């Protein structure tokens, strides 16, 4: 069989890998590449394979860098099954619709600005493509082995990364012999709020593994609440706002989970909390109907009437008018808004209105890819551009990686070591080059010899 590495290779976005046998071609993930506008268009528009020749798509989880180009695939002729967990399917229903909306708005904006009126820009994909994609989903729970093509079957295991996230394990049968490929992208962490711990795969022949934090350690999960409490207390005391750019999926719900506990323990003042993102509001609705994915602690909170997604002072905002009202408010508050990397959405308005006020704090709680506004803020650049205008970065910036839903260096090494009793070969993807190469070195130091860091569009025969 051949493995084609077509995305998130020596980078973190646009996950796309094809497993090819004599009989089938199965695509694992179909993520949106995020980055500079020109690269965004080129990389997302041009698939390095023919979408009509893919026999099935296996989707690990609903994050846009893994699922976001599914409507593009469908637009270009893909009509086969998309296998994912049920929660991933339901999350995609709201996330892909939202992504399509962003593509449509983006094209509209560019068409208004363009000089050459003959060259109309069409969106990467539309809401209709996203709706069509939803018809192809097949939802499967963890632990159930399902044939996806005549010679490939998939079993999903809990990745402990976001709601419904899976580690797909593919059983590929060729010439009467079956070999297992495990796909650990993205791999979560033990003890994350809300979720169960990642399932330990130890019987794969090949493992495609992420390396986002291949050379970095996170702060402990326990320290997150303490640090967030200190930030909220400090900012509220000087009358400022806490602005949290957050991914709509998982990070937002984890922060709410954390805030609920801090309020209950009276460790932070009772200031208003706003979730200002229609997407985050819709995603939180999906969390409410999928408690079967929750860990013990969250189940107990629900049983004790301590719903992490519903508490006094918490307001969900859908309407633009209500979002705009937040700009006029002068009292301390916490605003959680998307997008997570500050590339689009309402967070841009909150940043624009609050970034020059030193009473405020911007809390960076997620991974910020290169060339994003989020990355520039996290790096503490003195000036940043928002909507093409320059703003001075006067607000405090706090970077908290303790909320990270990705395994860190120690987690990845430990995971690979327990898996390597069986896994013969490791392919490291989903990490910037320095991180991927560093992790390869660490794994070799641990006695795992067969570690490969593919380059973009590499094909490796195994
Ligand atoms: Zn992810």
Image (spheres, rainbow, N blue to C red):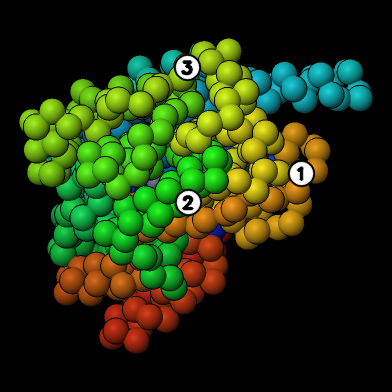
Q: Which residue is mark 2?
A: 234
Secondary structure at badge 1 equals strand
Locate residue 462, reporting x and y percent: 34, 64
Residue 353 visible (yes or no): yes
Q: Are marks 1 and 3 in contact (CB under 8 Å)?
A: no
**3D distance between C-alphas at marks 2 and 1:** 23 Å
332 sits to left or right of 439: right
Q: Nearer the viewer, mark 2 or mark 1?
A: 2
Secondary structure at badge 3 equals loop
Which residue is drawn at the image coordinates 27% and 59% (left, top)? 222
Residue 183 visible (yes or no): no
Q: Which residue is mark 3?
A: 318
Locate residue 279, reporting x and y percent: 45, 25
Q: Are marks 2 and 1 in contact (CB under 8 Å)?
A: no
What label sits on residue 391 in the rendered view? 1
**3D distance between C-alphas at marks 1 and 3:** 27 Å
Q: Sequence-wise, which precedes: disc 1 or disc 3?
A: 3
Q: Number of numbered discs present?
A: 3
Q: Nearer the viewer, mark 1 or mark 3?
A: 1
Of the pair 195 and 420, the residue shown nearer to us: 195
Which residue is drawn at the image coordinates 29% and 67% (left, top)? 411
Q: Is residue 10 above or below residue 442?
A: above
């Amino acid at each position: 069989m051949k493995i084609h590495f077509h995305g998130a290779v020596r980078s973190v976005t646009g996950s796309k890998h094809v497993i090819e046998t004599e009989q089938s071609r199965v695509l694992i993930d179909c993520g949106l590449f995020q980055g500079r506008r020109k690269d965004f268009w080129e990389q997302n528009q041009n698939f390095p394979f023919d979408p009509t020749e893919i026999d099935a798509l296996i989707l690990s989880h609903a994050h846009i860098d893994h699922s976001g180009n599914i409507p593009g695939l469908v637009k270009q002729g893909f009509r086969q099954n998309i296998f994912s967990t049920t929660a991933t399917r339901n999350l995609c229903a709201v996330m892909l619709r939202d992504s399509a909306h962003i593509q449509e708005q983006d094209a509209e904006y560019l068409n208004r600005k363009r000089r050459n009126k003959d060259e109309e820009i069409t969106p990467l994909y539309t809401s209709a493509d996203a709706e069509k994609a939803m018809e192809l989903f097949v939802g499967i729970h963890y632990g159930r082995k399902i044939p996806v093509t005549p010679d490939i079957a998939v079993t999903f295991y809990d990745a402990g990364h976001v709601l419904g996230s899976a580690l797909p394990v593919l059983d590929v049968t060729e010439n009467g012999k079956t070999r297992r490929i495990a796909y650990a992208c993205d791999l979560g962490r033990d003890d994350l709020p809300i979720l169960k711990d990642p399932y330990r795969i130890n019987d794969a022949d090949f493992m495609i593994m992420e390396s986002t934090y291949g050379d970095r350690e996170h702060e402990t999960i326990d320290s997150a609440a303490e640090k967030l409490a200190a930030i909220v207390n400090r900012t509220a005391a000087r009358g400022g706002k806490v602005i949290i750019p957050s991914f709509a999926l998982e990070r937002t719900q984890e922060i709410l989970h954390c805030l609920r506990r801090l309020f209950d323990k009276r460790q932070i003042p009772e200031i208003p909390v706003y979730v200002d993102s229609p997407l985050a509001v819709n995603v939180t609705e999906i969390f409410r109907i999928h408690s079967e994915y929750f860990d013990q602690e969250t189940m107990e909170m629900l049983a004790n009437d301590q719903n992490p997604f519903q508490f006094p002072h918490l307001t969900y905002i859908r309407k633009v008018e209500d979002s705009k009202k937040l700009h006029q408010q002068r009292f301390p508050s916490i605003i959680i808004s998307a997008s997570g990397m500050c590339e689009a959405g309402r967070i841009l308005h909150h940043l624009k209105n609050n970034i020059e006020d030193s009473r405020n704090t911007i809390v960076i709680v997620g991974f910020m890819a290169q060339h994003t506004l989020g990355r520039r803020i996290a790096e503490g650049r003195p000036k940043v551009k928002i909507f093409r205008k320059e703003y001075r970065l006067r607000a405090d910036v706090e970077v908290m990686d303790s909320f990270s839903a990705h395994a860190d260096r120690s987690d990845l090494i430990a995971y690979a070591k327990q898996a390597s009793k069986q896994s013969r070969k490791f392919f490291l993807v989903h990490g910037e080059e320095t991180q991927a190469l560093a992790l390869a070195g660490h794994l070799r130091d641990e006695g795992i010899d067969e570690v490969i860091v593919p380059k973009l569009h590499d094909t490796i025969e195994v």
